[in-house]
Image: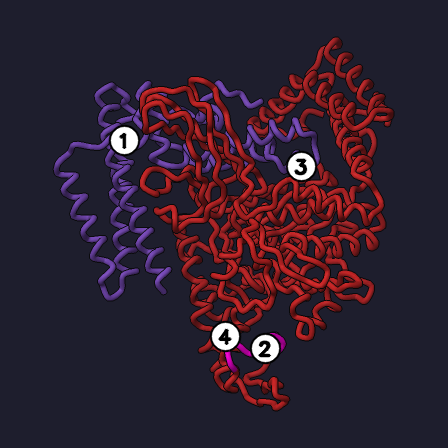
Amino acid sequence: MALLQLSEPGQSAAPHQHRLAVGIDLGTTNSLVAAVRSGKAVTLPNDDGEHLLPSVVRYTENGIEVGRQAKEMAAKDPLNTIISVKRLIGRGLADIKSLGNQLPYQFQDGDAAVPRIHTARGDVSSVEVSSEILKSLVRRAESSLGGELEGIVITVPAYFDDAQRQATKDAATIAGLKVLRLLNEPTAAAVAYGLDTGSDGVHAIYDLGGGTFDISILRLNKGVFEVLSTGGDSALGGDDLDHAIAEWIMSQADIDRDADRSTLRQLMQVACQAKEALTESDSTAISVVLADGASWQGELSREHFNILVDPLIRKTLAPCRRALRDAGLTPEDIEDVVMVGGSTRVPRVRELVGEFFRTEPLVDIDPDRVVAIGAAIQADILVGNKSDNEMLLLDVNPLSLGIETMGGLVEKLIPRNTTIPVARAQEFTTFKDGQTAMAVHVLQGERELVVDNRSLARFELRGIPPMVAGAARIRVTFSVDADGLLSVEAQEQSSGVRASVEVKPSYGLTDGEIESMLRESIDHAQEDMEARKLREQQVEAERVIEALTAALEDDGDALLNADERSSVESALRTLAEITRNGDHAAIKSAVDALEKSCEFYVERRMNASVRKAMSGHSVDDFE
Amino acid sequence: MLDFSKNYFELFGLPVDYIVDTDHLSTHYRELQKAVHPDRFANSTEQERRLSMQGSVRINEAYETLKDPILRARYLLSLHGIDMEHGQETTRDAAFLMEQMELREALEEARDQPDPYQVIAAFMADVNQRINALIAQMAIQFEAATPEQLEAARENLRKMQFLKKLRFDAESLEAELDDAL
């Protein structure tokens, strides 16, 4: 790359090459991948023209199958075929059991943080299963787009907690993918709709997927999507409607609760088909083959189906009311309700939601694809293909974050529905004379008592100098980044003793586990870790060089004097030289050195852009 | 990075005052985030991402503070050199405290009413009205900004914190009812 390319004013030096990035909707039932092609976001089909990839992974002695092929074996080979893995991700064994689902898998005993499912191909965690789905979609995208992806945006339910988000990101890491952003599903849907209709105002996004429910209230204003509030239930979805039907069949057909696994799988499939049939017709025939070879025939009317599922659908309205309250709004303030997720095809869902918000729900975009499309639009912007784009997403953290205090109570540091990124600090003190350590217990949830909330992590701040009780000042800082991921730091103020954790949730994989899983998956790609590290570091160095070069062209003359400019340029040349010849450690330290020496310039640039924003001028006015 | 010596009002180009032009505030908030938000630097260097995160956090904090009548009052008092202890100060106004107890009892009884949701909604509307009345008083007090008036604003702020807690408890009660469904 030429470092000092001259360009006419108002003309960018070299049109940036189009970078490949995709949006992935990693769903409970189905997953999709979408990309912006020729300016339009589209979902990408496989070779057979199918867009939806069933989120099903089957482990056999011969290999791993993902998608339709695996799904077809779900009833025959239930132990090795993992469905609805999204319900398990980021959860511990106790959580999974409390979900009350009749999961057919054999979980490994033991107290490992991440539950492992026993399969014919060894024990696998939900993170690994998810990473197989990601890999399959990325392969599809790379062959369809004809190149390697620079990054992906993965959508998650807005109501996912920190553990579930972290686990999703880990799944991408294990698959060797760079995550540009974890994007909340309702926000993604709003992007797909907002750009389509361009209508400013307050919108509600009602997202009932296979296994999760989300509600988001957001305001669209000149390209800025500001999420005002969000709520939901991360363990409620279309699967539960199927369960309700399955239970009804069981009671009608006298099927035992402890029937064999393939009968249960068959029941769920039949129930799902019945639900889908009732979207169009008023009644549907049901037939089940029992374990003894006999069969049961029945008929389910839509009317009775509505009675079965009404309590479940009504359960989604409480979070809707709460989200409205948090946004300080009433149903009348909502311009329209966007329906997302396959389960919103159920007529009764549309009816009750329309009643609640007093408006006819919007169903213009295929509810299965809208999330992936929104994610693709965001990925295209984040990867840098549209530098002049005005769109910006301002999202919130869905659940309050706090710390355990005396008496088993939770002190909230960041309340739910706070716009991210956010950092909040609070001071705590010691309660015993001479106390030299303090335990920090990080919690997520809305309840007052520790036991009623989700425990995210525990760590200890040690080495506090002995003082009388109440004299130490321990400052605990919570930071939530734009992905909604939390990190926590504790520091004793007078001595500067510091302890910090990237909140690796109690149910998460350790960095070591991630590294070894990544190593395994790389082995298949016949590339060793060293080569991979070198390549990653080179990419990072190139990114730095490119960004700085573009910056110099843009405003180097305006913000730097001649001496400063030549020192930046010489530092750039040094890095370019080392990037070509050095190993990954050398490149890394060269990148660090460059960043340090250019810090003043980067700060000046950001201040300049803030000044421009404040004076209401765009860059064009200066050219 | 963002000029950290600027106070929150200056950051948004607003006069230092309790009454805030909310349209101006939210327009400038969006413009500032468009310039510094981490999404603008997702594919940028780690250094830029870090700076952008810091800037974006600061802007969110400032916006949050100026939007909320309680946080705004506390911040404004701190600019006047009056630092409230974090939520620890309470009012000694006996009549007000008596009223609070009555309100609290009313809320406790809501749970046994035939339509508790409606009772809670009416309760919250009442509390909001009380908060708005305090906001109106504080606007005048901050405008005058004499030591006596600022002390009066501080007293109002203590009362407002009570009411906010009451509103929060009403929300919690409602959530509890939801969970029992």
Judged from the image, the secondary structure of the residue bearing numbered disc 2 is: loop
Front tag of 4 and 3: 4
Provide the residue designation for mark 2. Answer: A260
Chain bearing tag 2 is A
Provide the residue designation for mark 4. Answer: A244
Across and down, in percent, residue A62 comes to 80, 63
Chain bearing tag 1 is B
On screen, residue B98 versus residue B107, left or right, reads: left
Chain bearing tag 3 is B
Q: Alpha-carbon distance for marks 4 and 3?
A: 43 Å
Judged from the image, the secondary structure of the residue bearing numbered disc 1 is: loop
Provide the residue designation for mark 3. Answer: B42
Provide the residue designation for mark 1. Answer: B88
Image colour for chain B is purple
* Residue at screen point 78% across, 51% down: A37
Question: What chain is colored red?
Answer: A
Question: How crowded is the residue under tag 1: few (<14 C-alpha within 10 Å), some, or many (20+)?
Answer: few
User: Where the N terminus of chain B falls, by quadrant?
Assistant: top right
